[in-house]
Amino acid sequence: MPLLAEELACVIDLRRRLHRTPEQAGNEAAAAGLLLGFISRFRPDEVITGLGGHGAAAVFRGPEPGPTVAFRAELDAVPVAEVDGAAHCSRAPGASHTCGHDGHAAIVAGVSCVLARRPVRRGRVVLLFQPSEETGEGAQRVIADPKFQRIKPDWIFALHNLPGHDRGQVLVRAGVFACASSGMVVELTGATSHAAHPEQARCPALAMCAIIKNLIALPRSFDFFTLVTVVHARLGEIAFGTTPGRAEIMATLRAAGDDQMQQLLAAARRLAAEQAARERLELATRFCDPFAALANDPAAVDLIRRAAFESGRELRETAEPFRWSDDFGRFTAVAKGAMFGLGAGRTHAPLHSPTYDFPHELIPMGVELFERILAGVSAPPEQERR
C-alpha cells in the first residue's frame, strides 16, 4: 500500500526537520521526540522512550497472535560540516545528517501512516529508533536495556541508502552484509631532549613512521578481505627547540567477519609492540568504536527479495560484504533479520560527504518495501489460508 500524496508530503517535511537539527551520538533526545510526535497521531498501542539512551519505539498490536516484527532506524548524525545550501541545511555547527539517518528514520516513521490505514492483523509491529549507531554502541545498549524485553522482535529489518548504485535498486546478501571494524589507538612514549642533541632523546619518529607504513600494508598478510586506514597521527608538540618524546597514531581496521577481525587486531597489536621495542619506547594500545560484522539471516533476505519483486524494484545480489560497518548486526544476532541497501543514485554525493543530502524519492520506496516485508512475515500459516 503506497503512501498517499499528503502522507508523503508530511514525511518529507519530517525528514527536513530532522535534517535541520542534527544531534550526534548520545544527544538524540530532540530527534526521538520529533519522531514520536509524528507517530503519535496514528495512536500506537505503546510508546517506549529512553531505550538504551535516547532510543524510542512505537508499538502497533494486531488483534490476533503472531510474530513481532521490528523496523529499525538510526537517530544520530555525523561530525561533518554540511556545505549544501538547501533550506533544510543543518543548523548545528560541525554536525549533519550526511549519512542519511534522517531519511531512514523518516521511512520507518512513514510506516505508521500505512499501519493507520491498514492495521496489522497478526502479532505486533515495532518502529524502533536507535541511538548512537555511529559509535557502535547504540544497538547493544538498546538490547541490554530491560525495556527491550517488552518489544524483543522475532524479526527485525533495516535499510541503508547507498550512493553509487542505481536509484531504487535493492541490494541484498545472505550472510555477512557489512564488515566488522574497530578503531585502534597507538601511543608511543620515549624521552625528549634539546633539538640540538637528538641523540640524547628516545624519539618515537622512526617507530611512528614504521607503524603507519606497516599498518597500511598489513592486509597483504591475509588471504581474506581486510583494510587498515590511518585516520590520524601526531608527533610531539610544536617546539622547534625540542626533540619529541611522544607520538600517537589512530587507525580504523576492517575485516569481512568477526573471526577475521580478531586476527587482524592481534596482528596490528604485535606490529606496534615490535616497533616500540626496537626503539625502546613505552607502548599503550587500545581499541574503540567496535562494530561486529552484520550477518543477514537467509530467511529474512528471502522476504526482502520477495518484497523487491512485488514492488517492481531491481534486485542486486552483492558478491562481497560492504566495507562499511553498522551495529545493526547486534540485532540480527538476537532475532531473525537483515539489512538491505537502497540505491541513492549512481552520481549521488557519497555518504559522509559535506554535500550529501538524502534523496526524497527513496522515502515511498522504503515504506513500500517495509510494508511488503511485513505482509510476508505476518501472513497466516499455509494451513490457515486453505
Image (cartoon, grey):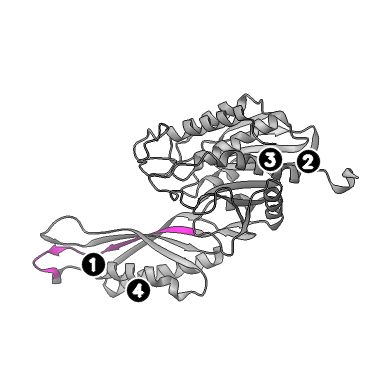
Residue occupying the point 27% across, 61% down: 247
Looking at marks 1 and 4 on the same chain, the residue that comes earlier in the sequence is marked by 1
Badge 4 is on which residue? 274
Q: Is residue 182 magenta?
A: yes
The amino acid type of the residue labelled 1 equals Ala
Regarding mark 3 in the picture, which secondary structure is present there?
A: helix
Nearer to us in this view, 43 or 7: 7
Residue 40 vertical placement versus 82 (above, below): above
The amino acid type of the residue labelled 2 equals Gly
Residue occupying the point 34% across, 37% down: 93
Determine contact: label 1, label 4, CB under 8 Å: no
**Disc 3 to disc 4, C-alpha distance:** 54 Å
Regarding mark 2 in the picture, which secondary structure is present there?
A: strand
Badge 2 is on which residue? 66
Q: Within 10 Å of the Cα at label 3, are there few (<14), some (14-19), or many (20+) other Cα atoms?
A: some
Badge 3 is on which residue? 371
